[in-house]
């Protein structure tokens, strides 16, 4: 396995020109790209999900559309229009940075799929490029949810042909990360590395500095509690989905990441508690949860629940063939009345399917060590 070709998530953000140190970081990042270009890339392409020879309902998943990128918008416009088949799409957040692009994206998706479900991601709540002067990111969220309602995009749990689909609101919190930190290197702070700290705006009492945002977004799911309980009593098959990640095992270990503190801004324990309430502590053969955010393709079974990420990701990530995909997305997760075969090959989850997680080992992976040595 050519592990050294894997990048950290693009959430890792370094603002050029901010300081000499950061400029140097950027040069090292570019150097990393150079190295990647000159190493033999032997990764196989992910096999497209089937859209033929199926009977009944089909459910597709995708996350991190980022349609502010022209290439991503072009991919979206190239999707086949709605046909006779009953097709459902679950969009696991980070659709677009502006409200205008969000509405356009969801309208186009509704032209391709009979049912579209959505949960918001962090980029959807950024305000920095909005023409409208929002009081805060929650006001923008309300407007987005209203737009979904108008367009017929579902944001609440719903049953389609016996299959329960449950969108879950979430936000990350730093205490989600309980694995050992990497000592001996200077890692840029979360405030510097993550644009959310500058691009989102929150009302008093909500902040990225504690659990308040994570609990606020989690509590948004309470209004659906009765509906979910009815679904648990009447549906054998349930697919839940969120933008953020529910378990740290769904991200590579810190020593593998160019930004080793990434696990501090990606996940929510409250989310995993919701998922376990829905699917059970031991899960079942029909239990599946879809997520997004980190741009790492993922498909793995953990304690009886299948966890899947199928991100479109950024054009530059697709060009490096590190993450994301355009020729195999959206990924078909359910057809012929059951969950489909695993995404294959799926780099990091394949790696963890045969290698134990050893977070107590804090020696940096060679490609990360090289990066930090040059700072
Ligand atoms: Fe995200």
Image (spheres, rainbow, N blue to C red):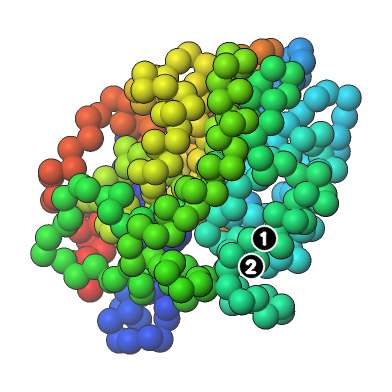
Q: What's the CA distance linking mark 1 and mark 2?
A: 5 Å
Residue at image location 55% in from the left, 35% down from the top: 225
Q: Vertically, is 272 above or below 316?
A: above
Report whether the residue tagged 1 is closer than 8 Å to ligand 1: no
Which sits in the foreground, 100 or 228?
228
State the SS at label 1: helix
77 with respect to 245 (left or right): right
Query: Given contact means CB atoms under 8 Å apart, are the residues at marks 1 and 2 in contact?
Result: yes
Residue at image location 28% in from the left, 25% down from the top: 354
Which sits in the foreground, 323 or 60?
60
Which quadrant of the figure contains the N terminus? top left
Which sits in the foreground, 38 or 357?
357
237 with respect to 335 (left or right): left
Q: Quadrant of residue 27?
A: bottom left
Q: Vertically, is 98 above or below 3?
A: below
Tell me residue 205's x, y (percent). Answer: 42, 69
- Look at the image and tell me whether residue 221 can be seen: yes
Residue identifier under label 2: 139
Which quadrant of the figure contains the C terminus? bottom left
Residue identifier under label 1: 142
State the SS at label 2: helix
Q: Quadrant of residue 296?
A: top left
Tell me residue 255's x, y (percent). Answer: 22, 51
Tell me residue 135's x, y (percent). Answer: 61, 77
Q: Which mark is residue 104?
A: none
Residue at image location 64% in from the left, 34% down from the top: 157
Residue at image location 35% in from the left, 81% down from the top: 23
Q: Residues within 10 Å of mark 2 (few under 14, many from 20)?
A: some
- Look at the image and tell me whether residue 60 can be seen: no
């Amino acid at each position: 396995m050519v592990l050294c070709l894997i990048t950290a998530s693009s959430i890792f953000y370094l603002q050029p020109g901010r300081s000499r140190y950061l400029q140097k970081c950027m040069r090292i990042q570019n150097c990393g790209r150079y190295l990647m270009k000159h190493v033999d890339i032997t990764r196989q392409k992910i096999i497209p999900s089937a859209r033929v020879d199926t009977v009944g309902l089909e459910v597709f998943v995708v996350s991190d559309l980022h349609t502010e990128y022209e290439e991503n918008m072009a991919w979206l416009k190239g999707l086949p229009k709605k046909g006779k088949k009953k097709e459902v799409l679950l969009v696991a957040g980070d659709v677009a940075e502006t409200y205008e692009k969000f509405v356009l994206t969801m309208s186009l998706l509704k032209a391709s799929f009979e049912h579209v479900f959505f949960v918001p991601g962090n980029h959807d709540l950024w305000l920095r490029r909005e023409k409208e002067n929002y009081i805060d990111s929650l006001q923008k969220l309300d407007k987005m949810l209203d737009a979904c309602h108008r367009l017929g995009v579902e944001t609440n749990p719903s049953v389609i042909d016996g299959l329960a689909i449950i969108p879950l609101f979430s936000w990350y919190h730093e205490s989600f990360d309980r694995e050992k930190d990497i000592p001996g290197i200077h890692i840029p702070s979360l405030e510097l590395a993550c644009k959310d700290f500058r691009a989102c705006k929150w009302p008093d009492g909500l902040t990225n500095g504690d659990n308040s945002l994570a609990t606020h977004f989690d509590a948004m799911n309470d209004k659906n509690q009765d509906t979910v309980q009815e679904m648990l009593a009447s549906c054998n098959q349930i697919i839940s989905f969120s933008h953020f990640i529910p378990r740290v095992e769904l991200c590579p270990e810190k020593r593998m990441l160019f930004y080793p503190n990434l696990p501090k801004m990606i996940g929510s324990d409250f989310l995993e508690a919701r998922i376990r309430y829905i699917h059970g502590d031991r899960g079942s053969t029909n239990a599946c949860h879809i997520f997004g955010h980190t741009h790492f393709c993922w498909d793995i079974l953990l304690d009886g629940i299948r966890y899947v990420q199928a991100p479109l990701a950024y054009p530059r990530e697709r060009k490096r063939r590190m993450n994301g995909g355009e020729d195999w997305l959206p990924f078909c997760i359910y057809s012929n009345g059951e969950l489909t075969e695993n995404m294959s090959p799926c780099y990091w989850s394949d790696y963890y399917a045969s290698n134990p997680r050893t977070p107590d080992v804090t020696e940096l992976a060679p490609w990360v060590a090289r990066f930090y040595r040059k700072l």
